[in-house]
Image (spheres, rainbow, N blue to C red):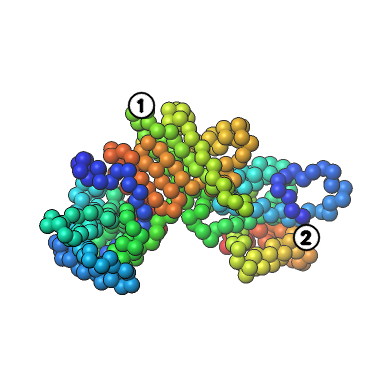
Amino acid sequence: NLNSQTTAFLLRKRWALYSVTPLYKFSRAHLKAYAKLLSAYIATEKQKGLAVEVGVELDIKVAVSSLPDLKGSDQDETAILVQISLRSQASQKMSEEKLVWSGWFCSVCGDDLSKNVPADFTCLPVFLANGAESYTSIVGSWFQKTFDCCFHRLAISPLNLSWMAAMWTGCKVEENASAIELVFSVPHLPQSLDISYAIHPEDAKALWDTVQKTPGEITQEEVDVFMDCLYSHFHRHFKIHLSATKLVKVSTAIASAHCDGIIKFLQSQYITEVLMLLTELAISQIQ
Amino acid sequence: HLATSLPLPSEGDHLRPRIDLIVFMIDIKNKYSLKNVEASLAHVAASFFLGKVCFLVTGVGRVNYCSVEMSSIWKLGDVYCSPVLYCELELERIRVATAQRLLRMLQICAGHVPGVSALSFSFLLRNS
């Protein structure tokens, strides 16, 4: 189970999702060395063409560590966390460190990928980043050069978003849970239009409970029936066929996901479950 | 002739020429298009399913925009014994190639190609 320090850092942040191919000759023993190398790389990259404020020296500090709690099974590789902090040493004696960027690699029940891969490779197919895009691309290119891997943005299709809506609606939540919100983008209009459909979480869960036949198992048919019920309810009131639009965002009390590949964890006890789904999506993108 | 759904309005019945081929278009980005096709299929006479119906799936180029599961479309093809073709409407080359294929199919279904029947051709398409 996840300790509260790990979860506090994960929750309520917008994480951009990437799929990562297996890393070649990555060693858990050399994390400190990797941190130094990455730090030097960032410093040189940042100096290329960036205007630096005169008088304020910004020291870049990189920390690479393990997150032992974030895994599904013993076959999963331990998650790796990379953090970039800026240390400003202006006039004060005490230098302040400010965390500006975090990124972590993980694998939860990623056996489908790891069982087919030779021994020198480390499988951590999911990468989540929070912070400036410029740091993400610098860190990404360092990892790609050093470990011969490939990062790809992990977009989430409307089909997969509906799975998330159904799965997360079914999770038990406490009183005063936030509403289930589905956002749809209407195509082919001169001005883009977004439709937001909010459903009371208890009503949504009651609907899901009538649809799901076996607890713990979800089929595509059940997801389709669940979504069709929501669509026909909307159509009855507004005469709009939501099924002709594109589902772009799903928000529940557990987590929220956007089709551009952005995730937000909202409850600590379901983090592993959400990561399991993301691992599956990342693996299918890699293969 | 293009229609957004079936049945066709009865007013034009006497003016309409014989229908030799029905192509049902399903946009993989649009779940409603699948539902519409499923509802329209119910209005088609059984004799059409002997090689005079095919499904054309568009939008397959972008996996991340999928709102329809490919397996439900394959199932449709199986249940209605009709071939499933794919087309990426945005690329002109593919559009032209698909149009040529459909034209060829239409020629066979209308009986203009001696020695090849609509039924045998659709059997070939489905099993290749």
Above or below residue B31? Residue A216 is above
**Closer mark to the observer between disc 2 and disc 1:** 1
Q: Secondary structure at mark 2?
A: loop
Q: Is residue A220 visible?
A: no
Give the numbered dot on residue B110. 2
Query: Residue A7: x percent and y percent?
Result: 25, 43
Residue at 22% in and 57% down? A85
Q: Amino acid at mark 2?
A: Ala
Q: Residues within 10 Å of mark 1 (few under 14, many from 20)?
A: few
Residue A5 location, quadrant: top left
Q: Quadrant of the N terminus of chain B?
A: bottom right
Chain identity of mark 1: A
Q: Which mark is residue A175?
A: 1
Q: Where is residue B76? Give x, y as percent.
A: 59, 48
Asked whether, in this view, residue B100 is left or right of residue A136, the answer is: right
Relative to residue A150, is residue A81 depicted above or below?
above
User: Label 2: chain?
Assistant: B
Q: Secondary structure at mark 1?
A: loop
Residue at x 61% of width, y 32% of height: A236
Tag of residue B128: none
**Nearest the camera: A207 or A136?**
A136
| Mark 2 neighbour density, 10 Å: few (under 14) some (14–19) many (20 or more) | some
Question: Residue A148 appears in which quarter of the rendering?
Answer: bottom left
Locate residue A152 relative to residue A53 in the image: left or right.
right
Q: Position of residue A146 (x, y in %)?
A: 25, 70
Of the pair B29 and B1, the residue shown nearer to us: B29
State the residue in front, B103 or A25.
A25
The residue at the point 40 percent across, 38 percent down is A252
